[in-house]
Image (spheres, rainbow, N blue to C red):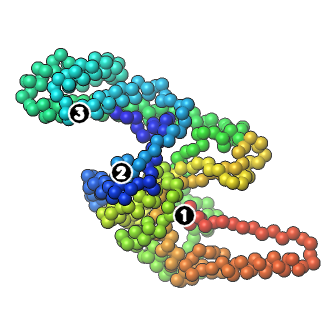
Amino acid sequence: MRAPIYLKQRSRYHTVYNFHAALPDQKVFFTSEVDAGLKSSDTLATSDNLNRNWHRLKLALLNAARSAFPKQVISLNKTKSVPSELQPYQHISHKLDHYIRSLSKNFTISELYGSWNRFYPSFCPLFLELFSDQIDLINQLPLPNSLYSVFISSNLPFKTYLNKFKGLLRPLKRLISAKLKLEFTNYKQNTMRATIAEQNANFYEDKGKFIRSEKNENVVGPSRSPFKSLNELPERWQRRYTLIIDIDPDIYQLIEALVMAPIDNLELMAVINNSPSRKAPGPSSIPYEWFKLLSTDGISYLCRLMNLCLASSDIPEDWRLASIVPIPKPHEFKIYTCSRNLPRNTRPITLLETARKLLVKIITDRLSKVMATHQVLTGDNFAGLPGSTVITSINVLDGIMKSHRISSQTQELWILSQDISKALTLLI
């Protein structure tokens, strides 16, 4: 059994599936594999659990990409190795996995006998050393010198017996896999605590080391608010969230009716087709391009999942996670410039789940239409709504600058530019 995917990603390498290098036949195969993955699990209609339903779709997409697309293994840190406390479990996991894969369908009883004689004597002591309380599990396996007699007494065709023989190995495989996953979880939690303590110390004592640290590529979740309802907020923020009395109350009902209405397949497909290409994905590594290959069944599954989000006013837990990574910039990113040790040509970027961004895009488009149609926003302190323009704001700014140039006053003219285009996304 191979190490869990997180072990590969955090300690050795991760695999990138190259959608753009895939051939047309490979893309068709990807679509069919996603459909097969969704059909092999329970349908969405049988459960309203957001996390379980998203996990099914995510697994179907990742498994299909693994089977269909060209892949590239990227080393994260060649100097790192698997932690010493996990090496025995990983070694025996690889050993058993390699042996099971070596059992060819074209094997004969003689070849099985030879391979079992080579594998069992070295595997059994390793297994009992790590799982001394599982001796009953190892005793279910035939001893090498009794394999012939067990096969003959079974009165089964050899291929049938070979499948039964493999079945005896699967409980061991599951046990080792579960143990490796448990040990890795413990290791990850301990490492995380130590890393957080180190990063906290560096933030206050050595900010340059904090930014340069290889550990600053993290998957993070939302901050936890101590307030359970709007009534518990401080008075200042209660005023901010109070409904604006100048707006027609019917507008709020209209927003509830139109913005939160069920999504249909055509609306979802339009948003997917208009999504950008070659954008870095979130923690699941699922890009927009994969959604563009979904069949009608795949679109329907995703559509029903999003409608379940709207109906429950909630999203899957995975959609609350984000990857924060530093990216290089052509110019200096002036942060903590008092430190000479800081790399000033990088800045952090937050990568969200693409499925979540598709849902947010649908809600944003609907909300923008209501705002523009009913002229909810007034003045020039907004932009980006359908039919809106920034010409008025530009003309006002240009007029101020021209007036200042011809003025006899020598005072400086200061202009503040704010980019809050993602404010709605952050609130959602």
State the residue at coordinates (44%, 54%): 21
State the residue at coordinates (47%, 68%): 274
Kind of residue at badge 1: Thr
Question: Counting other residues with Cα less than 10 Å from the Cα at mark 3, is it few (<14), some (14-19), or many (20 or more)?
Answer: few
Horizontal side of residue 326 vs 316, given as left or right: right
Kind of residue at badge 2: Ala
Res 167 visible: no
Of the two numbered discs 2 and 3 on the same chain, state the one appearing first in sequence.
2
How far is disc 1 from disc 2 in space, using C-alphas?
33 Å
Horizontal side of residue 193 vs 162, given as left or right: right
Where, by quadrant of the figure, is residue 411 drawn? bottom right
275 up-or-down from 395: above or below: above
What element does badge 3 sit on?
loop
Circle 3 is placed at which residue position? 104
Residue 295: horizontal and vertical position, in percent? Answer: 33, 63
Horizontal side of residue 26 vs 137, given as left or right: right
Task: Give the number of the disc on residue 68.
Answer: 2
Residue 317: horizontal and vertical position, in percent? Answer: 44, 52
State the residue at coordinates (15%, 18%): 146
What element does badge 2 sit on?
helix
How far is disc 2 from disc 3 in space, using C-alphas?
24 Å
273 up-or-down from 2: above or below: below
Kind of residue at badge 3: Ser
Circle 1 is placed at which residue position? 425
Of the two numbered discs 1 and 2 on the same chain, state the one appearing first in sequence.
2
Task: Give the number of the disc on residue 341.
Answer: none
Q: Considering depth in this image, is 236 or 412 the residue closer to the camera?
A: 412
Residue 116: horizontal and vertical position, in percent? Answer: 23, 22
How far is disc 3 from disc 1 in space, using C-alphas?
53 Å
Res 327 visible: yes
State the residue at coordinates (45%, 36%): 7
Depth check, mark 3 against mark 1: the one in front is: 3
